[in-house]
Image (cartoon, helix red, strand yellow):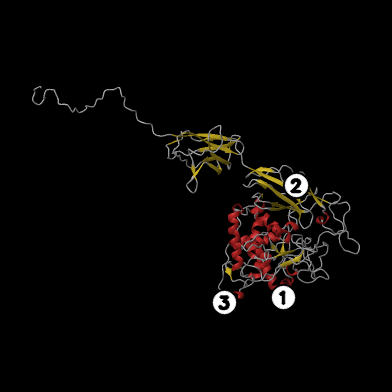
Amino acid sequence: MAAQFDRRLRKAAVTTTVAAVAVAALSASQAPHVTADANGRQTTADNVPTADTPAEQSATGNSPYYTDLPPLNSPSPAPTIGTPASRQPSEAGIPATVLDAYKKAESELRRSKPGCNLPWQLLAAIGKVESGQARGGRVSADGTTIGKIIGPQLDGNGFALIKDTDNGAYDGNSAYDNAVGPMQFIPSTWAWAGRDGNGDGKKDPNNIYDAALSAGHYLCRNGWDLSVQADLESAILSYNNSQDYLRTVLSWLEHYRKGTHEIPDGTGTLPVGRSDDPAVGGPDPSPGRTGGATTRPTTPGTPSPGPQKPGGSPAPGNTTDPTGPSAPTQPGTGSPSPDPTDPQTPPDNQTPTDTVHHLENAGTTGLTATAGDTFAKKISTRAETKAGQAVGKVRIRFTILGDTDATFTGGEKVAVATTDASGVAVAPALVAGEKTGAFTVRAAVAGRTVPGLDYRATVTERVADALTRTGATELTCAPGGEFADRVAVKATHKGAAADGVAVTAKLVRSTLDPAENDKGPYFKGADGKAVRTLTGLRTDAKGLLTLPKLYADDTTGTFVLRLTTAGGATLDVQLKVAGAEPSPSPSTDAPDASPTPSTEPSTAPDASTGTGA
C-alpha cells in the first residue's frame, strides 16, 4: 500500500489497540484452524509457505496483507442510522463498482474457463485482504483507483528480494519491485497475467475491472478446479504463499458466500492490522527504519519470532531472529556472505537472476502436434552463467508468439517456470489449437534483459487414412432435379474415428481426370449458384460428415464426386442423372385392331332390315 496510506493505518492501529485486540481475539475464532494468543494475535503451528511456490513466483511477491477477519454477526445489512460511514468497522459490504468488477470477472471466466468454477466471492476475499476492497471502493467511474495502491518495495529486508522488472513503470521504483493495485500484482507477474477487464484496450493493474479479471485468470491456471478444496487452496497459496494468508482468505470467502451487500463507492471501511504491523503481531521496525513501506516485516509465510517479553524482546531461551537462522556476514555490511561450497549462492549479494548470462536449449526438439492434440514434448530451457554453469532458482517466462491459437495447459499464452538445481526450467505442455502452421515460443529470464531463446513449433492438420460411405443407396436424380439422398461418409485413422478432419468434396470429370467438371451434378452456394468444389468441411466427434444436398442440371450420364482428406484418404462416389424410361412404340407389322370408318357405300346386307344389296 502507499506509504501515506500505511502511516494512517498504523496510527489507527496504535490508537485503538485495546479495541483491536478484543475484536481480533473474538474474530480469530472465525478462521479455520486459527487460534488467538493472549494479545489477540493469530497463532499457528504451520505458518510456513509451501515449498514449491517461491515468493517471486506468486502474484504479490508475498507482500503484506490485511489480517482483519469477518465479523461474527450475519453478513446481511443491519439497520443503521445516518450515513453508511456510521457503520461499525466490521462492515462487510462491498463497494458497488468493486462488486461489479468481481461479478463480471466471474462471468467471463465461466465462459472462457468453465472447468475452473471460479466464484466471485473468492475474488472479493482476496480483494479484501490485499487492499480492503480498493481502499473502501475509492475508485473512479471506470474502476481506476483514486491514487495508486503500492506495497512496500521487495528489497529482501524482511520481504522477498525481487529487483526491478518494469523500470518503475507501474510502481515508480526502478530498483526493486512493489506490489501494485487493488489486487496487489507485482509487475513481473502482471506482465503475463494482466488482462483488459473493462474493454478500454489497456491492461492497468490500478483498475479494479482489469485487476479482478487478471486475478481470476491467475487463479484458474494450471488446470485448477476451484470447486475442489485442494485446488482452491493451491490457487490461494500461489497468490500469497502463507498459511495464515490462506486461512484469512478462506474465512472471508466463507463469509461472502453466506451473503453480502452492495454499498456506495468510497464508503467502505478501511482495513486495519496488516501482517507486517507490530500491532497485530508483526515485528517491530528495524533500527533506523520508520514509516509504512520501510518497516521491516516478517516475510509473509515465514515463522514469526518466538514468545515475546513485555517490551518486545525475545523470551528467555528463544534467540530466533525473525529473518531466520543467523548466517556469516560480510565484514562491515551485515549481509550474509556467499557460501563458497554452494554453487547456487551468487556472489556480491546478487540474486541468482543477476548471474544468468544466457539461455540454452535443454534438449527440446521436434515440437510438432496434430491440431487439437497436446504436444508430446515439453519445452526445456537451461539458465547458465557466462562460464556455462547452471543457475537454479531463476524464473523463466515462456510466451507463445505468432498467429496461432495454441496455448499452454490451462489456456494461457504465457507461463512461468523456475529453474531447478540443474538450471533447467520446463514449461507446461503445449496444446495445439485448430490453426495449422508454425509459431514461436520464446523463453526469457523474468526480471533480466537477457536475450530470449526461441523454439519453433508446428501444428499439422488432422488426418484420416480411410473414408467410407455410411449408406449403400444408389444416388440418382432426374435432369434438372435434386438428389433425394445426401452423401454421408465416415473418416478413420488407423481404424479409429478421425474427428475434426478437413474434407474436400469435388465433382470431377472422371476417375482418371481430377479436373473440376463444368456440367452435371452440383452443390448450391449461398447465392443459389452452382458450386462443384467444397472446402472447409470437417468430420464431427465421431468422424462423420454429411454433405449438403446435390442438384442436377439437364445433362444426363454417370458422374464422379471425389472426397479427399489430409493424410491421403480418397473416396469416389458415383452419381447418376437419367431421364424417365420411354414407353414402348406400336409395331408397324401388326394388324390394326381398331376399325377404320369406310367412305364407300356398304354392300353388306342391312342388318336392320335383314336384306342384302
| Residue furthest front as drawn | 600
**Which x, y percent locates residue 324?**
81, 60
- Give, as a three-letter code, the residue at label 3: Ile
**Which x, y percent locates residue 218?**
67, 57
Report the front residue among 102 and 452: 452
Q: Earlier in the sequence, mark 2 or mark 1?
A: 1
Looking at the image, is 184 positioned above or below residue 475?
Answer: below
Left or right placement of residue 546 versus residue 340 in this view: left
| Quarter occupied by residue 394 | bottom right
Q: Circle 3 — which element?
A: loop
- Residue to which mark 1 is pinned: 15
For disc 2, the neighbor class at 10 Å (few under 14, some 14 to 19, many from 20) is many
**Which x, y percent locates residue 217?**
65, 57
* Residue 433's disc number: none
Which is closer to the viewer, label 3 or label 2? 2
Left or right placement of residue 48 versus residue 606 in this view: right
- Give, as a three-letter code, the residue at label 1: Thr
Report the front residue among 123 and 177: 177
Label 3 vs label 2: CA separation? 63 Å
Q: Circle 1 — which element?
A: helix
* Residue 81's disc number: 3
**Which x, y percent locates residue 550?**
47, 40
Looking at the image, is 211 positioned above or below residue 520?
Answer: below
Q: Circle 2 — which element?
A: strand
Residue 414 appears in view: yes
For disc 3, the neighbor class at 10 Å (few under 14, some 14 to 19, many from 20) is few
Q: Earlier in the sequence, mark 3 or mark 2?
A: 3
Q: Earlier in the sequence, mark 3 or mark 1?
A: 1
Name which residue lies at 14% across and 25% down: 602
- Residue to which mark 2 is pinned: 380
- Give, as a three-letter code, the residue at label 2: Ser
The quadrant of the picture occupied by the C terminus is top left
